[in-house]
Each structure stands twice: as C-alpha cells, then as structure tokens.
C-alpha cells in the first residue's frame, strides 16, 4: 500500500465516524427534549451527548479535515470544479457540527430552548450534504 491509499482509507474511516455522530447526536437531542431537565434521564443524556461529541465526533471531524487536506494537495483538487461544491458542503457540515456542539452546551446547562421539531429537521441536513458530497466525489459532474 502506498501513502496515498493509506491516507485515503483513513479519510474515509474518519468521515464515516463523523457522519455517524452527526446523524446520531440530533436524535439524542430529540429524546432529551422529552425528559424533565435535571432528571436522572436528562443527566444520562448529557453524559451520552458529551462522550459522543468529545470522544468520537470532534476527533473524527479533525481527522477528516487533516486527511482530506492531504488528499486535496495530492490530487490538485482545487483546480477541479466538483471539489468546490464538495468543499462548500464540508464547510456546511462543520458548521452543523458547531451548532450541535452549542446545543449540547445548552442541554448541559438545562437551558435548551429548541423543540424536537428543530432537532428532527437539523438531523436531516448532514444526510443531504453527505449525498451531495458522495455524488461530487464519485461522479465528478463538474
């Protein structure tokens, strides 16, 4: 195996882990909305949300960016049209990650003001971005 293949594999693995978290964390928030702040269930959700974000999502996002940066350089992606669409989607995915992290801090402080509906909707955004990203990388339409 050459270095490029190893880095590409690590990029795919880190993106899968990041996506898993981006799809799961908002679902936890939906369920967290159903319980009384300060309750035993609420405290359990806080632990789950914190561990998911800090132990899986944050490292996976950072690894995705690092390995992706290497790949951008290796294939001269900046000169390819499809890459600009992908990069925009990855930036939006990172923004969603940051929104979810802020929501976690609000839950942690028992100060959530958002509804289950909000979390159900935001739960769909990473999936839509993922579809666009996959089509850009595989089909390279531009």
Image: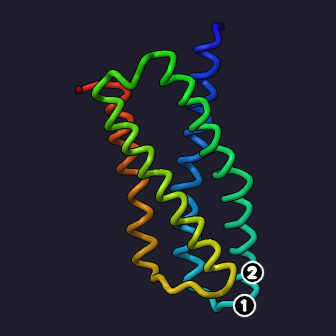
**What secondary structure is marked by label 1?**
loop
Q: Which residue is drawn at 62% across and 72% down?
A: 104
State whether residue 139 is above or below residue 26: above
| C-beta proximity under 8 Å, tags 1 and 2 | yes
* Mark 2 neighbour density, 10 Å: few (under 14) some (14–19) many (20 or more): some
Name the residue nearer the viewer: 80 or 109.
80
Q: Nearer the viewer, residue 58 or 42?
A: 58
Residue drawn at (56%, 59%), measured in percent from left and top? Answer: 24
Q: Residues within 10 Å of mark 1 (few under 14, many from 20)?
A: some
| Image-based side of 115 in relation to 25, left or right | left
Q: In this view, does 48 lie to the left or right of 76?
A: right
Q: Residue furthest toward the top?
A: 1
SS for callout 2: helix
Residue 45 coordinates in the image, percent (x, y):
69, 74
Colour scheme in the image? rainbow
Give the quadrant of residue 5.
Answer: top right
Side of 136 relative to 62 (left or right):
left
**Rendered view: 32 above or below 87:** below
Count the labels in the image: 2
Residue visible at 50% across and 20% down in the picture: 73
**Foreground pick, 114 / 76:** 76
Q: In which quarter of the image is the N terminus?
A: top right
Of residue 141 and residue 26, the one placed in the foreground of this image is 141
Of the 4 image quadrants, the one containing the C terminus is top left
Q: Where is residue 97 in the image (x, y as percent from the top left)?
A: 53, 57
Earlier sequence position, callout 1 versus callout 2: 1
Pointer 2 residue = 43
Q: Find the distance from the CA under tag 1 to the CA under tag 2.
A: 6 Å
| Residue 23 in the image: above or below residue 122 | above
Mark 1, residue position = 38
Residue at 38%, 68% (x, y): give it. 121
């Amino acid at each position: 195996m050459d270095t490029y293949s190893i880095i590409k594999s690590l990029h795919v693995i880190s993106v899968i882990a990041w996506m898993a978290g981006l799809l799961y964390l908002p679902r936890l928030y939906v369920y967290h909305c159903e319980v009384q702040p300060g309750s035993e269930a609420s405290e359990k959700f806080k632990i789950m949300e914190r561990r998911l974000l800090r132990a899986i999502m944050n490292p996976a996002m950072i690894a995705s960016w690092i390995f992706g940066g290497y790949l951008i350089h290796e294939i001269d992606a900046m000169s390819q049209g499809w890459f600009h669409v992908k990069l925009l989607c990855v930036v939006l995915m990172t923004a969603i990650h940051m929104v979810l992290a802020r929501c976690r801090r609000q839950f942690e402080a028992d100060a959530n003001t958002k509804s289950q509906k909000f979390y159900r909707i935001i739960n769909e955004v990473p999936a839509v971005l993922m579809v666009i990203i996959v089509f850009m990388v595989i089909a390279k339409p531009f």
